[in-house]
Image (cartoon, grey):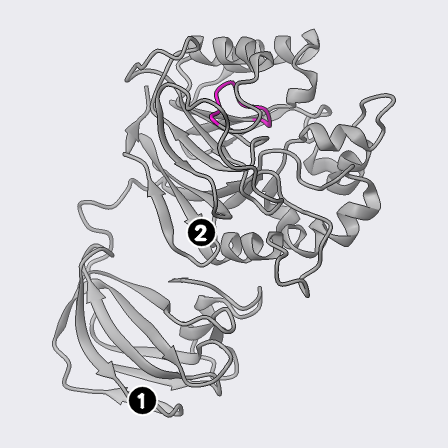
Amino acid sequence: MAASSSEDATLTPDKAVDGNTSTRWASQEGVDRQWIRIDLGEGSTVNRVKLLWEAAYAKTYRVEISADRTTWTRLATETAGNGGTDDWTNLNGKGRYLRVYGTVRGTPYGYSLFEVEVYGSSGSGPGPTDPPTGAFTVVGAGDIADQCTQSDANCQHFKTAARAEAINPAFYITMGDNQYDDAHIEDFENYYDKSWGRFKAKTYPVPGNHESYDDYENRDEKAYREYFGSRATPQGKMWYSYDRGNWHFIALNSNRFDEDEQMDWLAADLAANTKKCVAAYWHEPLFSSGDHGNVPVSRPVWELLEGADVELVLNGHDHHYERFAPQTRDAQADPNGIVEIIGGAGGKDLYGQGDTVQPNSAKRIWDKFGVVKLDFTDTGFRSQFVETNGTVLDTSPTYSCH
C-alpha cells in the first residue's frame, strides 16, 4: 500500500484495505491530485472496484491499473462524484498495481476512503523485475526542525515529516541539524518531537553542528543525546553502525572528525564488516555546490570509505538537495566511486545556490523542501528526492554494489 500523502499518522493507506469500515485513509487536506495505490501481485485481473467514501470524497477521479507503476491504463472515470459508495463493475483490467487517483475534491478537505475493494483474480506475486527478497526502503533528511508549529502555514518540517511517514519506510535516518537554532532540549520537545519525533523509535540519527551549540562552551551535543536517548548512542558513542539485509550502515558525528577515537573506530568497523554493500551518513559533506561549499574536514573519512569500496554517502548541512555521480576523494568521476547525496531540505529555510557548481554534480534542487527516498536491494540501490506534495523531482540510476 502507498499513497501520495496521509493527513496524519492514523489515517494511512493500509486503513483502506483492512476490511474495517470504521477505519480510513485520508490525504492531505486542501490539495487536489492525490492518490492511493494497491499492490495486487503480478498478473492480476480486475473486473470490479468498490469504493466506500468518507465525507471527504472526490468529485472527479480515475481508477487505473498498471504493470510497472509508470504506465497507467484507465478502468473508470468519475466526473460528478457525490460521495457514498461507488461500485464499478464489468471492468477489464490486467496489471499489478491499482490506483484511485483523485483530481478534484468534493469538499474543502482532502480525499478519504473507508475501503477500497478490488475483485477479480489475484496475481502470482512478485514479478521478474522486482527486487530481491532483502529489499527495503529508507527515508532520510537533514536540517529539519525550525522553531515553528504546525499552525504556521510556512512551517515545513511538519510537511516533510508527513511525506516521510507516507512513504512508510523500514526506518528513518537524519543527516544532522535535527533541531534549530541551538538545539536545546526544550526546542527538541516543542518542535522536532511534534513532527519527526512521531517516528523517533524507528529513527537512526546523527548530530549536526547546531546540536553542538546546546553546550557551546564544551561543544557538546548534550540535548541531542538527552532527546534521542539510546538511539543517539546505541554503541556508547555518537557514532555507530548497524545492518539491514545485505547492507551495512555507518552513522558518524562530523563535529568530531578531528578525534582519533572516532576515526580509529571507523577503520575497525569497516575492516570487520561482512556485508556486500555499505552506506555511511553524517552532517557536513565533502562535496557541495551550496552555500557552505565543500567541507575538507570530511576528506579523511571519505578516504577510509573509498578504501573499503563503500557505495553511498548521505549528508546535510547545505540546505538544498544535490546528487553527485560516483566519484573519488579528488572529485574524479569514477564508476566505482562513491555516490554522495545531500538531503538538507528537511524543513529549515533553504539557502539556494552557492558560488560554484562542483564537478560530478548530477542534479541540484534549490527551492523545494522534501525527503530522500532510498530503495535498497541485496545488490544495489536507487534514490529519489520526493517533494512534500509527493512529486518525485529526481530519480537516480540504479547502482550496483561494488
- Mark 1, Cα crowd under 10 Å, few <14 / some 14-19 / many 20+, is some
**Are circles 2 and 1 on residues that touch, CB within 8 Å?**
no
Left or right side of 57 for 73: left
Magenta stretch: give its range: 282-289
Q: Earlier in the sequence, mark 2 or mark 1?
A: 1
Give x and y (percent) for residue 104.
36, 78
Q: Residue at x 72, y 41 (%)?
A: 180
- The percent position of residue 267, horizontal first and vertical second, equals 56, 9
Disc 2 packing (10 Å; few <14; some 14–19; many ≥20): many
Depth-wise, is mark 2 or mark 1 nearer the camera? 2
Is 185 situated above or below 362? below
Q: Along the horizontal axis of the image, is 54 left or right of 174?
A: left
Q: Where is residue 81 in the image (x, y as percent from the top left)?
A: 33, 89
- Marking on residue 86: 1
State the image quarter where residue 124 is shown: bottom left
What amino acid is labelled 1 in the image? Answer: Asp
Which residue appears at 48% of the width and 18% of the height? 273
Q: Residue at x 69, y 47 (%)?
A: 146
Assign a secondary structure to mark 2.
strand
Residue 43 location, quadrant: bottom left
Q: The N terminus is located in which quarter?
A: bottom left
Q: Is residue 47 visible?
A: no
Residue at 58% across, 25% down: 292
Residue highlighted by disc 2? 387
